[in-house]
Image (cartoon, rainbow, N blue to C red):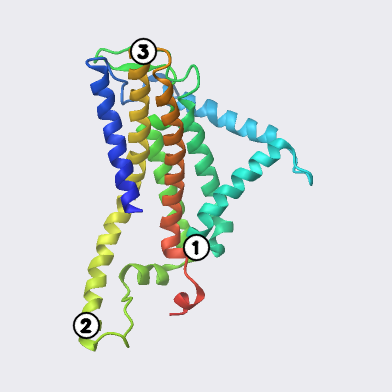
Amino acid sequence: MSRIRQAIYISGFFATTLTMQAAEGAKSVSPYAYQLTEIYGLPITNSIVTSWIFSLVIILVFRLIARKPQLIPTRGQVVVEGLIGAVRDIVEPIVGKRMIKHTFPLLLGYFTFILCHNWSGLLPGVGTFGFYDEFGHLNYWYRPANADLNMTLALALVSFAAWMYYILRYAGPKVILYDLFGNKANKNDVPAAMYYFLFLIFIVVGFIEIISIIFRPVSLSFRLFGNMFGGENLLTSMTGLVSYIVPVPFYLLEILIGLVQALVFTMLVSVYIGLICNHDDSEHAH
């Protein structure tokens, strides 16, 4: 999993770098959300408006295509059931059979929400019309929500809060402390001196693990933002250089990247939950 994350980080970095080099002086997309207006002092940005529109579209589309479940499924029901089955087959081995019924609504919602917003930038009108600011950055009137760091950070913080709830509710403080600081060695398999020395090792490793846990929202948010923002710049540059035919492969690449990033985000949240909550009865008894 760590190698996958490193590869995704590197791909996002090179996507952004190649975008700038390909443009050769062309102005890049602004990394900041543009404020369109404000409501009671709260800023309403271009990415917020896009997120509201597509969130509403997601709700309406799924309500229309699924409707009331039938014994003989309609085409829309087949699509929804296929999506549910595919995501469940992926995350159930990670979070475990005991936790899947509790975590699946969150994980399915994450995958669907992130995937639709990742692909939103490929639709006409999104990332199409805009203007240049005084810094030479291109600001779109509507831009993909996940190309805004505020959105990806919000998703990461919600996943962190959900992770805290699940491990406290379904694992408990005792299991959490054992997973972080407990001695995992079998006393009968190692010498007594080594066994007690391992207590110190596991305590140090536990504190390192706590630091990595604290930085999880940062890694989750920047990974998704970096890939989506890099893709937005890439499509802008390629379309600006040649309007027809040439950008098509890059649009197909963004379809793949959008799917992979939605899957990676969902799987990482599943892994974080499963690391503590996915234990069999013998481990809990121990």
Which label lies toward us, 3 or 1? Answer: 3
In three-dimensional space, the C-alpha distance between marks 1 and 2, rounded to whole angstroms, equals 34 Å
Q: Position of residue 11 (x, y in %)?
A: 31, 37
The residue nearer to you, when weighing 160 against 116, is 116
Q: Secondary structure at mark 3?
A: loop
Q: Earlier in the sequence, mark 3 or mark 2?
A: 2
Mark carried by residue 191: none
- What is the residue that sits farthest to the right in this orientation? 71
Q: Is residue 87 left or right of residue 48?
A: right
Mark 3: amino acid:
Val
Query: Residue 161, can we see it?
Result: no
From this view, report whether residue 196 is shown above or below residue 49.
Answer: below
Q: Position of residue 192 (x, y in %)?
A: 24, 88
Q: Which residue is mark 1?
A: 169
Q: Work out how far the residue at label 3 is from the one at label 1, CA to CA, in angstroms.
A: 54 Å
Residue 21 % position (x, y): 23, 22
Q: Quadrant of residue 258?
A: top left
Q: Which mark is residue 242?
A: 3
Q: Nearer the viewer, mark 1 or mark 2?
A: 2
Q: Secondary structure at mark 2?
A: helix
Under mark 2, the amino acid is Met
Q: Residues within 10 Å of mark 1 (few under 14, many from 20)?
A: few
Q: Upstream in the sequence, badge 3 or badge 1?
A: 1
The foreground one among 187 and 18 is 18
Q: Are marks 3 and 2 in contact (CB under 8 Å)?
A: no
95 vs 191: above or below: above
268 sits left or right of 107 in the view: left
Q: What's the residue type where badge 1 is placed? A: Arg
Question: How far apart in space, not on screen, are marks 3 and 2 (Cα)?
Answer: 66 Å
Q: Is residue 86 visible?
A: yes
Q: Which residue is mark 2?
A: 194
